[in-house]
Amino acid sequence: MKKYTVEIVHPKLTAYKLFVDDVLVDEGDCIKNQQFKNITGKISIWYEPWKIHPEIRIDDFLVNYSLAEIDVYDHKLDFKLDNNFVSKYRANDIASREKAVFDGKGGVDKYIYDAVIGINSNHSDIVQSIRKVFEH
């Protein structure tokens, strides 16, 4: 199973508890941030003071609570880290963009889709034109 590094950050963050698979594995005081290394499974991060919303980074990438399927409470973050976390996050990101831009609209313009979603194209024509500029 892949292991992840998770970091929570907030200017008012003062204390934390880390539960992995419902077992308390770490707790303590902190100032503004706390990092947890080599974790995987059902994760619950409790924090103080309550009613803050810390940023969360997973393997150094700032993640969106909704796209990462993080349940947010006034005192904790609950989520699951497994081998499929990155692929699920990417699929949620693409689905969210598709819904925001194209939901309820007729046919989808492939150029607008590529500009907004940015997948399924290696843009070889654009790459070639840029290379020609640098070659001269």
Image (cartoon, rainbow, N blue to C red):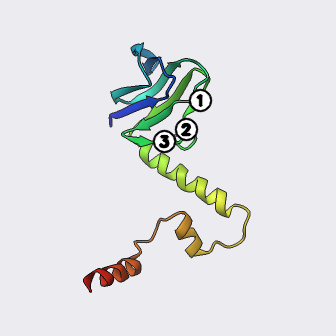
The amino acid sitting under disc 2 is Tyr
In this view, the residue in front, 1 or 91, is 91
Label 3 sits on residue: 63
Q: CA distance from mark 3 to mark 2?
A: 6 Å
Who comes first in sequence, dot 1 or dot 2? 2
The amino acid sitting under disc 3 is Val
Kindly state the secondary structure of the residue where label 3 is placed: loop
Kindly state the secondary structure of the residue where label 2 is placed: loop
Residue 61: where, in percent of width, then height?
A: 41, 43
Q: Spot the residue most to the bottom.
A: 136
Judge the density around disc 1: few (<14), some (14-19), many (≥20) Cα neighbours within 10 Å.
few
Residue 9: where, in percent of width, then height?
A: 46, 30
Kindly check if marks 1 and 2 are in contact, taking CB atoms under 8 A apart as contact.
Answer: yes
Kindly state the secondary structure of the residue where label 1 is placed: strand
Residue 14: where, in percent of width, then height?
A: 47, 17
Kindly check if marks 3 and 2 are in contact, taking CB atoms under 8 A apart as contact.
Answer: yes
> Which quadrant: the C terminus?
bottom left
Kindly check if marks 3 and 1 are in contact, taking CB atoms under 8 A apart as contact.
Answer: no
Tell me: residue 20, above or below residue 135: above
Q: Quadrant of residue 98?
A: bottom right
Tell me: residue 98, above or below residue 123: above
How many dots with numbers? 3
Give the side of residue 131 with respect to residue 57, left or right.
left
Label 2 sits on residue: 65
In this view, the residue in front, 26 or 134, is 134
Give the side of residue 36 with respect to residue 96, left or right.
left
Who comes first in sequence, dot 3 or dot 1? 3
The amino acid sitting under disc 1 is Val
Residue at (56, 75) in percent of width and height: 111
Q: Which mark is residue 131?
A: none
Judge the density around disc 2: few (<14), some (14-19), many (≥20) Cα neighbours within 10 Å.
some
